[in-house]
Structures are given as structure tokens and as C-alpha cells.
Image: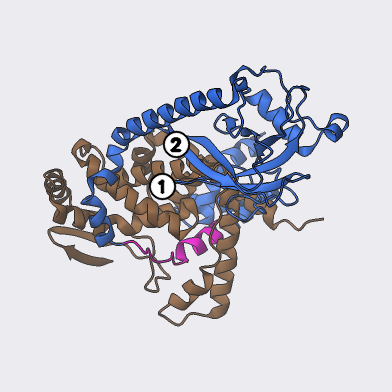
Chain colours: A blue, B brown
């Protein structure tokens, strides 16, 4: 009992002991205890290894920065690039994006007629084979459905995405049969700055060589040139509509959640082999 | 200890062992009255004064960002964004903390935003810079020592990569940047006691991860 309480009292000092930061008296006290306690001795050895490694990191030169005061000065003299003015820039962009979405919806309504009246319960991602054996994508989509609201309106040529920050993205495309080269993609990405959510419109395209019969991976890169441009990974797979009335092929695009990327899929930074916990 | 004069700013840079001309942990300490004058001039829009702030702290900001993000390009971006933001917000700086901790706080927040914007991408540390770093060494250093140091650095970075962000920040600030509890408390906006507790937990977590990594696999 006595030993255990001393262990817990001294365990706070073991790091400083390993880093040689303790006073002579405290060092003597710790060493006296270590002579008697094997567990603390092992722990002190672990601390010593860790401290040694951190010392190596401190000694390791950090690469030289490439950016200079002149580069910063040039940006300082361009008022619109001030980070503080972001909030002012953000509103018009959002308004523009909203207006664009409304316009696109109206246009699609005119073109398709019934596009906006499609029932919400349509399961456009079910395939004949997948009805018996759920595919990887279906599993992802089921997870995404559980995580976020399901988009109810699908329209030809459009892709709807619903995802919550930190949740798998669900993007659906209902592509006309004639569209065989490039599929336009428009997605939104939310970033949080403090208490404010910043929605950034991302546009891009996926270009399948032919209509794929098997799921394959396509990368959606942000169309804009902002420094924080985000690259998503999407799995695209052809599906058959459940409703008899819907004859055009549907596509389901879902992001690959971290740790589930397999086979042909690659992570956004090109190294899918990351290990360790997520941030 | 090197005493440097940059305009009216006098600061010392504590260079640690192993300095070979590259960027090693430096702690800029401005004399209190001088820093106030500098901030006053910056508030008035004096770019020369801000250039002095930049010259004084850019290394530390870059280094901090580099250790949090793990690569030079992102650290460079964040460094510039930190100073851009500081320039824009200097009027709201109330001198309740030092410029150093204020800049590191901005830098830390920007790093968090950057990491969030990566979505599922995790922090990966450059290993491609090793040769470059070895090449940068001005002084003759035992190649074996360099290799061993690189291995240990890689291992620590691998461990840091797997740690929760809050613990990684604590380790970087306290154990790599060598900031004291008060400075970290200012940066994180919490009490000194809280920082002490967090440091203890982060150290223990780091030790456990290092131990498990070094343990021979059965």
C-alpha cells in the first residue's frame, strides 16, 4: 500500500527524472524508489527512451521556409486577400451559389418535367446483383443514409450530395444515357471557422472512359483555385432504377470513408497506407 | 545565446545543441516596452514595424506549423496566413499576452482548420526532406548519428501522427518548442493547472505509444 502511493506520487516526476530536470534531492528520492520498485524502473526506462527521441526531434533541423517577407508584403497590399475580409467575401459567394442552384433547379424542372416530383423512397443504387449481396458501395451508402438526410429530388445531369462534417458523403448522380464522357459534379464542402460554417462550392467532373459496369474510383477535385481546395474520393457505380418508369441509368457516388479505401481506391493525398488514429 | 538587434527590437535567440545553421528552436523575447512600441506602430499601419515582427517570429511560427502539419508546403502557407491574419487583427491585440503566444495561437487555429479541411487525410510527415536536411548540415556530423537521429525523429513523428490533436499540440508546444506552462496556457486559453495536467497526460500517452511501437512483435 505504501509502495503503491509512492509509485503514484513519483510517477509524475519520472519524465523530469528521465530528462535530467530534477533537483539532486528529488533525483535521489526517485532513484531510491526505483531500486525497490521494478514496475517504476521499467516505466522510467520507457520515459527515458521517449525523452531521448524527443531530444532527437529537437535537434533535427526543420527545413527552411520558402516564403518570404516580400511575398507576404505583396499579399498585404492586396486587400481582398486579407483573411479578416473573408467574412465579407463569403456572403456574396453564398448568395451567388444559392442563386445558381435555384436557377439550375428551375431549368431542370423545365427540361425534365417530372424531375422534381420523384418519390423520396426511390432506391436508385440497387442493382440486380446487389439485391442479393450488398456491395461495398451499398454498405457505405447505407451508413451515409443513417448519418444524414437523404436527398429526395434527383434530376438528370445533376448530382446531389448530402453529408455532415465528419460523416461519409453521399452523392447521387442521375445521368442521361447520352452522357458518356464527362459527368459534371457540383458539391458543397463545409469548413468550420470558430462558430461559423463556411460553405464552399466545389465543381469538377468525373470522366469515365465508358459507362462502367463495375464500380470504380474517380477523384473529384475542387474546381476553384483556393489554397484550401479539397479533394474528395468518390466511388462511382452504375445502378438500375427501382421504378419501372425510370429507364435512365442512375449513378451512385459515395465518398470513401477513412480506413475503408480498398482496391482501386486511393486516398486524397496519395498515400492510402496511413496508419494511426484519425485526428 | 545570440544577441541580435532588428531595428528597435532586441531579442535573443536560444539556439539549442545541434544547431547546424538550419532552423532550430528559437525563442524570440522582445523587451516589453519595445514590443509595445512595435505593436503601436503596427496598429498605425507601419509595415516596417510589421516586417520586424515577421523577422522575429516567422521561424518559430513556421516551425510550430511544420511540427503540427508535417510538411513544408502547408507549414509555409500557414505561416504566411498567420501573419496576414495578425496584420489584419493587430488592432484587436490587447497586449494581454506576448506577441509570440498570440501568433502561435493564430497559427495553431489555422493549423486546426487546415487539418479539418483535409477531411479523411491524416497528418503525414515529410520523409523526403531527410536527404535535403542532411545536405544542409554545414558542420561535419557523424553520419551514423544523423541516421540514428532521423530514425528516432521518424518514429516520434509516426507516434505524434497517431495521437489526438490536442495531445499533439501539447507535446509540440512543451517538448519540442520548449514553451513553459504559462505560455501554453495563453496559447490554449486555459489555466496553468490545466496545462500541467494536459502535459502529464500527453507525456504518458506518448510514452505508452513509443513503448508499444518499440515492443518486439510476437
In the image, is residue B97 above or below residue A269? above
Would residue B7 be seen by someone viewing this image from the given angle?
A: yes
- Give, as a single range, the part of the protein colored magenta: A50-67
- Quarter of the figure with the C terminus of chain A: top right
- Camera-side residue: A198 or B100? A198
- Does label 1 lie on the same chain as label 2? yes
**Residue A51 magenta-highlighted:** yes
Q: Residues within 10 Å of mark 2 (few under 14, many from 20)?
A: many
Contact (CB < 8 A) between labels 2 and 1? yes
Q: Earlier in the sequence, mark 2 or mark 1?
A: 2
- Quarter of the figure with the N terminus of chain A: top right
- Camera-side residue: A160 or B182? A160
Q: Which residue: 69% across, 44% down?
A: A259
Q: Which residue: 18% across, 59% down?
A: B10
Q: Which residue: 50% across, 27% down?
A: A107
Give me the C-alpha separation between circle 2 and circle 1. 10 Å
- Residue B95: percent from left, percent from top: 21, 39
Which disc number belongs to residue A226?
1
Q: Quadrant of residue A74?
A: bottom left
- Residue A37: percent from left, percent from top: 67, 48
| Label 1: chain letter | A
Q: Secondary structure at mark 1?
A: loop
Q: Secondary structure at mark 2?
A: strand
B31 sits to left or right of A231 = left
Q: Which residue is mark 2?
A: A200
Amino acid at each position: 500500500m505504501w509502495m503503491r502511493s509512492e509509485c503514484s506520487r513519483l510517477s509524475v516526476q519520472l519524465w523530469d527524472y528521465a530528462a535530467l530536470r530534477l533537483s539532486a534531492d528529488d533525483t535521489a528520492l526517485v532513484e531510491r524508489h526505483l531500486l525497490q520498485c521494478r514496475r517504476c524502473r521499467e516505466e522510467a526506462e520507457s520515459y527515458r527512451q521517449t525523452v531521448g527521441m524527443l531530444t532527437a526531434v529537437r535537434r533535427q533541423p526543420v527545413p527552411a521556409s520558402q516564403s518570404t517577407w516580400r511575398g507576404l508584403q505583396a499579399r498585404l497590399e492586396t486587400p481582398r486577400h486579407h483573411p479578416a475580409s473573408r467574412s465579407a467575401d463569403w456572403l456574396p459567394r453564398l448568395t451567388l451559389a444559392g442563386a445558381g442552384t435555384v436557377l439550375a433547379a428551375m431549368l431542370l424542372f423545365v427540361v425534365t418535367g417530372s424531375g422534381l416530383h420523384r418519390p423520396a423512397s426511390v432506391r436508385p443504387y440497387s442493382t440486380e446483383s446487389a439485391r442479393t449481396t450488398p456491395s461495398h458501395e451499398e454498405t457505405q451508402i447505407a451508413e451515409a443514409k443513417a448519418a444524414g438526410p437523404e436527398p429526395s429530388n434527383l434530376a438528370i445531369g445533376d448530382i446531389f450530395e448530402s453529408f455532415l462534417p465528419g460523416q461519409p458523403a453521399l452523392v447521387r448522380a442521375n445521368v442521361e444515357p447520352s452522357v458518356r464522357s464527362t459527368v459534371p459534379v457540383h458539391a458543397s464542402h463545409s469548413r468550420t471557422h470558430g462558430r461559423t460554417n463556411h460553405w464552399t462550392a466545389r465543381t469538377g467532373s468525373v470522366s469515365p472512359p465508358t459507362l462502367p459496369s463495375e464500380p470504380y474510383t474517380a477523384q473529384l477535385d475542387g474546381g476553384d483555385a483556393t489554397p484550401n481546395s479539397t479533394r474528395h474520393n468518390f466511388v462511382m457505380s452504375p445502378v438500375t432504377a427501382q421504378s419501372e418508369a425510370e429507364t435512365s441509368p442512375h449513378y451512385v457516388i459515395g465518398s470513401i470513408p477513412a480506413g475503408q479505401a480498398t482496391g482501386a481506391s486511393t486516398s486524397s493525398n496519395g498515400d492510402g497506407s496511413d496508419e494511426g488514429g484519425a485526428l | 545565446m545570440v544577441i541580435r538587434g532588428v531595428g528597435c527590437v532586441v531579442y535573443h535567440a536560444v539556439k539549442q545543441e545541434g544547431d547546424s545553421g538550419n532552423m532550430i528552436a528559437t525563442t524570440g523575447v522582445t523587451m516589453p516596452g519595445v514590443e509595445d512600441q512595435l505593436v503601436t506602430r503596427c496598429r498605425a499601419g507601419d509595415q516596417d514595424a510589421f516586417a520586424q515582427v515577421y523577422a522575429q517570429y516567422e521561424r518559430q511560427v513556421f516551425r510550430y506549423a511544420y511540427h503540427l502539419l508535417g510538411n513544408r508546403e502547408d507549414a509555409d502557407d500557414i505561416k504566411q496566413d498567420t501573419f496576414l491574419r495578425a496584420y489584419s487583427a493587430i488592432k484587436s491585440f490587447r497586449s494581454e499576452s506576448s506577441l509570440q503566444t498570440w501568433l502561435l495561437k493564430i497559427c495553431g487555429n489555422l493549423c486546426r482548420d487546415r487539418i479539418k479541411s483535409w477531411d479523411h487525410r491524416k497528418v503525414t510527415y515529410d520523409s523526403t526532406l531527410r536527404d535535403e536536411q542532411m545536405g544542409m548540415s554545414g558542420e561535419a556530423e557523424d553520419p551514423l548519428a544523423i541516421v540514428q537521429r532521423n530514425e528516432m525523429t521518424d518514429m516520434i513523428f509516426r507516434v505524434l501522427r497517431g495521437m489526438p490533436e490536442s495531445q499533439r499540440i501539447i507535446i509540440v508546444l512543451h517538448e519540442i518548442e520548449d514553451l513553459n506552462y504559462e505560455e501554453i496556457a495563453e496559447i490554449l486559453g486555459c489555466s496553468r493547472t490545466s496545462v500541467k495536467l494536459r502535459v502529464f497526460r500527453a507525456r504518458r500517452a506518448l510514452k505508452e505509444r513509443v513503448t508499444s511501437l518499440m515492443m518486439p512483435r510476437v
